[in-house]
Amino acid sequence: MRIVVADCSVDYAGRLSAHLPRATRVLMLKSDGSVLVHSDGGSYKPLNWMSPPCSFVAVDPDPEQREEGVSEVWRVTHAKTADQLVVSVFGIVHDSSHELGVDPGLIKDGVEAHLQELLAEQIELLGEGHTLVRREYMTAIGPVDILARDSAGASVAVEIKRRGEIDGVEQLTRYLELMNRDPVLAPVRGVFAAQEIKPQARTLAQDRGIRCVVLDYDVMRGMQDLNTLF
């Protein structure tokens, strides 16, 4: 991973257009080709990003950009959509590269992991006609617990928690923002599934168009045992 602290402006061009005016930001370039732009606020969420598969090239600024003080221009192009993230670098404060190795991924506690397994087997609990696509569907920012399709064939991303709180809704929101950029998946609806969902988390989820589903772990385990017998 390469981490750069730079005085820069950022433009995103494609299905969506966005502009970040000149400021000092943290730029993360990952080995999978993804690029994330962070500020010193906003916690974990990048201001903008380009998810893989994509290509990165650094080019010299044109005369007009050079007059404005731009020293280098980064162009990050998505391989499938041709969307571009363009970073105009005015100056670099810090630039370092680090070999992180293979990440083992997030290890859920036993109940959450088992809930994921059970819901994948009993995907109809999400509604009649739902079908499983796969568990642990990988995105550029981590795996979605379950990717499914509803009765109409639309994509459904499911985040599973033992106790559903605001952090879990925020996590699913990030996945949905990223997945809805993929024309193969979009539109993607979200389902927040947990044994217990806190009122604040439910309110936030509903405000963002995310459906909440309460899972009865004991009943689901009982159904698994029953299926084993027959």
Image (spheres, rainbow, N blue to C red):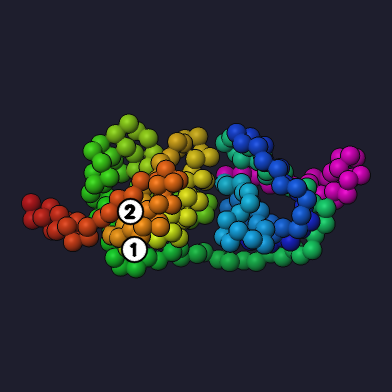
Q: Residue 5, position in %: x, y? A: 74, 61
Q: Is residue 91 left or right of residue 26?
A: right
The quarter of the picture where residue 80 lies is top right
Q: Quadrant of residue 86?
A: top right
Residue 32 x/y as whole percent:
58, 53
Evaluate if marks 2 and 1 touch, with contact meaning CB atoms under 8 Å apart.
no
Determine the secondary structure under disc 1. Answer: strand
Residue behind mark 1: 163
Label count reads 2
> Of 140 and 200, which appears nearest the observer?
200
Please report the residue visible at 55 percent of the width from the left and 66 percent of the height from the top.
101
Residue at the image point whose x is 22% and y is 57% from the top? 216
Q: Name the residue at the top extreme.
A: 152
Q: Position of residue 224 (x, y in %)?
A: 16, 56
Q: Split into 4 quadrants, where in the image is the N terminus?
A: bottom right
User: Between 56 and 18, which is closer to the camera in this rendering?
Assistant: 18
**Mark 2 or mark 1, earlier in chain:** 1
Q: Residue at x 81, y 49 (%)?
A: 72
Mark 1 residue type: Arg
Counting other residues with Cα less than 10 Å from the Cα at mark 2, is it few (<14), some (14-19), or many (20 or more)?
many
The answer to whether 108 appears left or right of 111 in the picture is right
* 66 magenta-colored: yes
Amino acid on which the number 2 mark rests in the picture: Ala
Residue 114 covered by magenta stretch: no
- Image-based side of 180 in relation to 69, left or right: left
In the rendered structure, which segment of residues is drawn in magenta? 53-74
Q: Which residue is mark 2?
A: 193
